[in-house]
Image (cartoon, grey):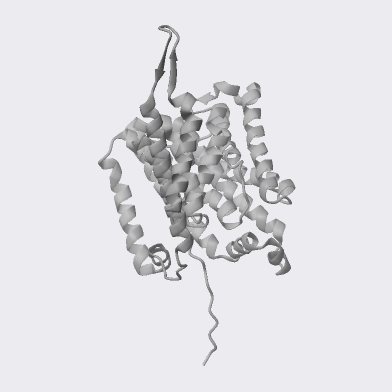
Amino acid sequence: MQDLKQSAFIAFWFMLLTFPIMVIRVNTIEKVVQWRWMNLLTVGFGAFILSYLWRFLMLRKETKVASVKVTWNQKLMSEKRYYLPFAATVLVLTSALPFFVSDYRVNILITAMIYVVLGLGLNIVVGLAGLLDLGYVAFYLVGAYSYALLNHHYGLNFWLALPLGALLGAVAGILLGIPVLRLRGDYLAIVTLGFGEILRLIMENWNAFSFGPSGIANIDRPGIIGIEMTRTQSTLFMYYLMIALAIFTIFVVNRLQDSRLGRSWLALREDEVACQAMGIDKMKTKLAAFALGATWAGMMGVIFAAKTQFINPMSFTFLESAIILSIVVLGGMGSILGVILGAFIFILLPEELRAFSQYRMLIFGASMVLMMVFRPQGIISNVRRSYEYHESP
C-alpha cells in the first residue's frame, strides 16, 4: 500500500512538472489556447506504472537470496563437452549465413564482427586489468590512418598494412601508457579521453598530412594476388576474413586470461596494493594490457579503412569509444562470450529497429541505467575462478 501511495505521489509530481509542456499549446495564428488533457493523463498513468514497477523490481532484487549454483554460461565456457559443439554449431551457421542474406546484411555483420574484436581488445584493458580507458578509439584511428596514408602515398597493400597497423597501435598504446598509467580511476579515464580527442583534432586540422575533414578516399580493399573480385565477392572475402580474425582474437584473449600475465591483470584489478606487495611489476603489467588492447584496435582500424574505402576524423569521435566501452560493460566485463553478445546487440539491434531511430539514444541510455541497477555484472558475467587445496594421500 505504501508503494502505491509513493508511486501516485511521483505520478502527481510528474504531471505538475510536465503540465506547461504537455498540456498547453498556444496557436499564435488563430490566437487560441489548446488544452491537451489526455497528454496529462498519459504522463500520469505512465509515471505511476513505471514508478511502481521500479519499486517492485528493487524490492525483488533486495530480497533475492544469493545463490552459489553454477550457471549455464559457466558450464558452457568451462566444460569442453559443451563449448566445443556450441562453437562448432555457431561457426557452421555463421559461415553459411551470407548465402541466405543480402550484401547489405553481410556488410552489417562485418561491422558487428569488427566491434566484437574491438570489444575483446578493450576487454583486456577494462575487463581484465581494470583500467578505465575512454580514448580507445584513438588506437583505432592510428590503424585506419596508417593504412589509408601508406596506401595513398606508397600503394602499400592490405596484407602488409594489417600487421603494421597492429604494431603502430601497440606503439601508440605504449607511448600513451608510459606517462599516464601512474594515474588511476577517473583521472586515467579523463587523460585517455583527452588523448583520443587530441588525436582526432590533429587529424582534422593538419590538412597537409591527413587531408583534414575531407578525409582519404579510394582506399584499396583486401584481395588475393592475381584474382580480380567483384564487389560482392570482395564483401564475402572480407566477411570470412573477419570470421578468421575474430576466432584468432578469441583464442588469444582466452589463452591470455589463463596465462601468468592474465592472472596478474586480474590481481591488479582486484587490489593494486596487494598485487604490488606480491611482487608483480605494476607498471609493466599495465603497459602490457594497454599495448595488447591497442594492438587489436590498430588492426581493426586497418580493416575498417579497407571496408569503407574512405575515412575521415568524424569516424573516430568519442561516441565510438563510448559504444565499445558499453559493449564491454553490457556484455560483462572480463567475459568473452558476453562481449561477443554485447557487440551483436549494439550493432545489429539499431539496424533492425530503424523505425525507432529517433529514440535510439533514449533507449540506449535507459538500457544502460537498468543494466547498472539490476545486473551490474553484465548479461553474461565472467566465470570467477576458484582454487581448492587437497592434501595428497
Return the x and y of residue 377 as percentages of the image width and height.
50, 56
Taking the spot 47% from the left edge, 25% from the top edge, the residue there is: 21
Return the x and y of residue 136 as percentages of the image width and height.
59, 42
Looking at the image, residue 38 sits to the left or right of residue 256; the answer is left
Looking at the image, residue 31 sits to the left or right of residue 199; the answer is left
Quarter of the rendering containing residue 387? bottom right
The residue nearer to you, when weighing 370 against 304, is 370
The residue nearer to you, when weighing 352 against 94, is 352
The residue nearer to you, when weighing 375 against 22, is 22
Q: How many labels does the image show?
A: 0
> In this rendering, is residue 357 above or below 254?
above
Taking the spot 54% from the left edge, 47% from the top edge, the residue there is: 296
Return the x and y of residue 222 as percentages of the image width and height.
44, 37
Quarter of the rendering containing residue 86? bottom left
The residue nearer to you, when weighing 4 against 199, is 4
Return the x and y of residue 364 as percentages of the image width and height.
46, 39
- Is residue 113 visible in this depiction of the protein? no
List the single residue furthest toward the bottom.
393
Taking the spot 43% from the left edge, 59% from the top edge, the residue there is: 60
